Image (tube, helix red, strand yellow):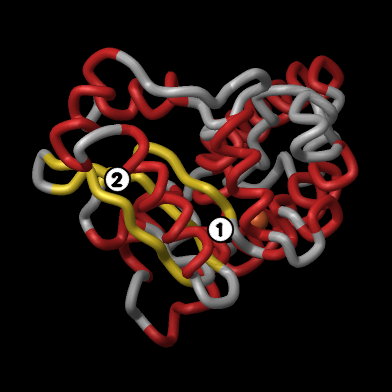
Amino acid sequence: MNTASITRREFLAAAAALAAAPLLGTPAIARAASPHVLPPLPYGDAALEPVISARTIGFHYGKHHKAYVDNLNKLVAGTDMAEMSLEKIILATAGVPEKAGVFNNAAQVWNHTFYWSSMKPRGGGKPTGALAEKIDAAFGGYDALRKELTAAAGGQFGSGWAWLVMEGGKLKVVKTGNAENPLARGMKPLLTIDVWEHAYYLDYQNRRGDYVNAVLDKLINWDFAAENLTRA
Ligand SMILES: [Fe+2]
């Protein structure tokens, strides 16, 4: 660990936080001195209304996501993971019982950042281009993919995530429990839907299916999935 690099990182993190926060109307990033920083939302707090309220975003991003970042920074401070990237921490701690706390917080930081980009204002509809071709090849069409995604999201018992992933050159739908994510299983995520109750309870109470359908119809960001596909 060297003082000069920490100082530079602190500066860059603080500069990024200051540049992004006022523009997006998101909370200022409080722990600029730590290695991991709450990334700015890709849109304003109210941009996903009426599907997801600004109130839900305020708690989900401003409290839950931020808490995972803060917890992770506390857990890795002074350890051999203090200088590791988020992805490296996830891979190094997945399936290691004594590192479960670090894994859970690191994976939840990554999962939420990925989730925010999996949605956009005026999203939804059907994917096109190379992604649509891959969907046709793997599922037989968008409608079948949609059925699998809603089944995965609805069928995840308790907290977790529904994902579209690439594995071995083929698209798949998978669900994961709690903080688990497909990176740790060697899969390449293309998009995700958060089905923890904190993602929808203020707006939909127990109606998880209504939340998932509304996200797929109005918010899902196929451009993001297509970009991830090119990196797969
Ligand atoms: Fe969440």
Determine which of the numbered discs, if any, sits on residue 173 in the image: none
Kind of residue sitting beneath label 2: Val
Kind of residue sitting beneath label 1: Gln
Task: Say few, some or many: other residues with alpha carbon within 10 Å of mark 2 (under 14 / 14 to 19 / 20 or more).
Answer: many
Report the quarter where the C terminus lies: top left
Mark 1–mark 2 Cα distance, whole angstroms, equals: 17 Å
Q: Which residue is mark 1?
A: 108
Determine which of the numbered discs, if any, sits on residue 165 in the image: 2
* Labels 1 and 2 touching (C-beta < 8 A): no
Tell whether 203 sits left or right of 120. Answer: right
Res 202 seen here: yes
Ligand 1 falls in quadrant: bottom right
User: Residue 112 versus residue 162: which sits nearer the camera?
Assistant: 162
Residue under the image location 66 percent in, 59 percent down: 208
User: Residue 58 versus residue 202: which sits nearer the camera?
Assistant: 202
Among all residues in the image, which is located at the extreme bottom?
Answer: 98
Mark 1 or mark 2, which has the lower sequence index?
A: 1
Label 1 CB sits under 8 Å from any ligand 1 atom = yes
Q: Position of residue 98 (x, y in %)?
A: 43, 86
Residue under the image location 55 percent in, 42 percent down: 115
Tell whether 128 sits left or right of 232. Answer: right
Among all residues in the image, which is located at the extreme right?
Answer: 55
Residue under the image location 54 percent in, 26 percent down: 124
